[in-house]
Image: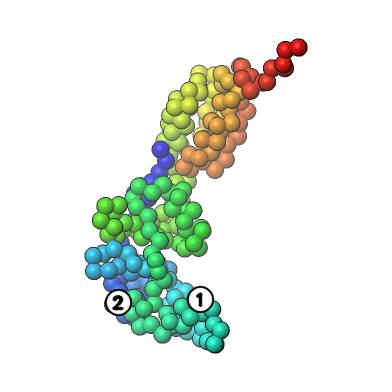
């Protein structure tokens, strides 16, 4: 269920070898209009990433002192580097084609990056690149596909939809009607909110049986 990286990824693997020169790095970024490139070994396996920030270290002085931090030492090393292998940040953060789009988005957000190399799950070799813009395509899913997924969720969770109206429009899901049991409502709404492309859920759902009601003890 849900869209995978393979559904939105670019099939072009934007990558350079470890011995690529500084000029090659700049030219690759300019040619493909990207903010980072993946560095691969001789077997086409990602070993690191060179970003615009790494490149710009050439233009600044990271400084240096007897008590400099690990980060400052790394920046000084990168600023002095002349090849991709010397400038790159390691390790490379990667995903596979089967990674859920939501997980890829979380990785980008957590690591403050805008693209990820996509690798083959068996060989570890790079097969493409997924960008932030690619992930935004989940919000352009056909409404019919989203409704069909919601109906599949309802069937899997044994939620009868005969008396439940489901309307999907512009990423908004509207649910109106009645379900059999009160205990079904919260997990069903949670699952619907997790559908790729859903921005918000507006629910007015009643129940026939309150199976969460705790009966008072018998005296």
Name the residue: 26% across, 52% down. 122
**Which residue does the image show at 49% across and 53% down from the upper left?**
106
- Name the residue carrying label 1: 71
Residue 210 visible in the picture? yes
Tell me how far mark 1 sits from mark 2, CA to CA: 24 Å
Q: Are marks 1 and 2 in contact (CB under 8 Å)?
A: no
Mark 1 or mark 2: name the one nearer the start of the chain: 2
Q: Is residue 12 among the parts visible in the rendering?
A: no
- Residue that extends furthest to the front in the rendered view of this protein: 219
Q: Nearer the viewer, residue 135 or 109?
A: 109
Q: Position of residue 131 (x, y in %)?
A: 41, 58
- Of circles 1 and 2, the one toward us is 1
Percent across and percent down for residue 120 are 29, 54
Location of the C terminus (image quadrant)? top right
User: In the image, is residue 200 above or below residue 39?
Assistant: above
Above or below, comparing residue 107 to residue 79 in the picture: above
Q: Position of residue 186 (x, y in %)?
A: 59, 31
SS of the residue at dot 1?
helix
The residue pinned by badge 2 equals 20
Q: Position of residue 168 (x, y in %)?
A: 51, 34
Question: What is the crowding at mark 1: few (fewer than 14 residues within 10 Å), some, or many (at least 20)?
Answer: few
- Decide if residue 115 is on the left or right side of residue 112: left
Picture residue at 30% right of the left edge, 68% below the top: 40
State the residue in front, 59 or 62.
62
């Amino acid at each position: 269920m849900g869209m995978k990286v393979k559904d939105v990824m670019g099939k072009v693997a934007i990558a350079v070898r470890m011995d690529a020169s500084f000029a090659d790095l700049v030219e690759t970024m300019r040619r493909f209009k990207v903010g980072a490139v993946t560095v691969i070994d001789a077997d086409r396996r990602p070993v690191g990433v060179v970003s615009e920030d790494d490149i710009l270290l050439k233009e600044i002085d990271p400084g240096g002192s007897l008590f400099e931090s690990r980060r400052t030492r790394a920046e000084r090393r990168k600023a002095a580097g002349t090849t991709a292998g010397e400038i790159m940040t390691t390790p490379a953060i990667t995903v596979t084609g089967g990674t859920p789009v939501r997980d890829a988005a979380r990785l980008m957000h957590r690591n403050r990056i805008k693209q990820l190399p996509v690798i083959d799950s068996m060989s570890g070799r790079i097969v493409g690149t997924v960008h932030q813009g690619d992930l935004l395509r989940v919000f352009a899913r056909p409404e019919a596909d989203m409704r069909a997924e919601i109906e599949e969720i309802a069937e899997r969770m044994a939620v009868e939809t005969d008396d439940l109206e489901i309307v999907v429009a512009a990423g908004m899901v509207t649910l109106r009607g009645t379900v059999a049991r009160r205990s079904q409502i919260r997990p069903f709404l949670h699952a619907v909110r997790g559908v790729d492309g859903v921005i918000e859920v507006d629910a007015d759902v009643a129940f026939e049986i309150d199976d969460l009601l705790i009966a008072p003890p018998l005296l």
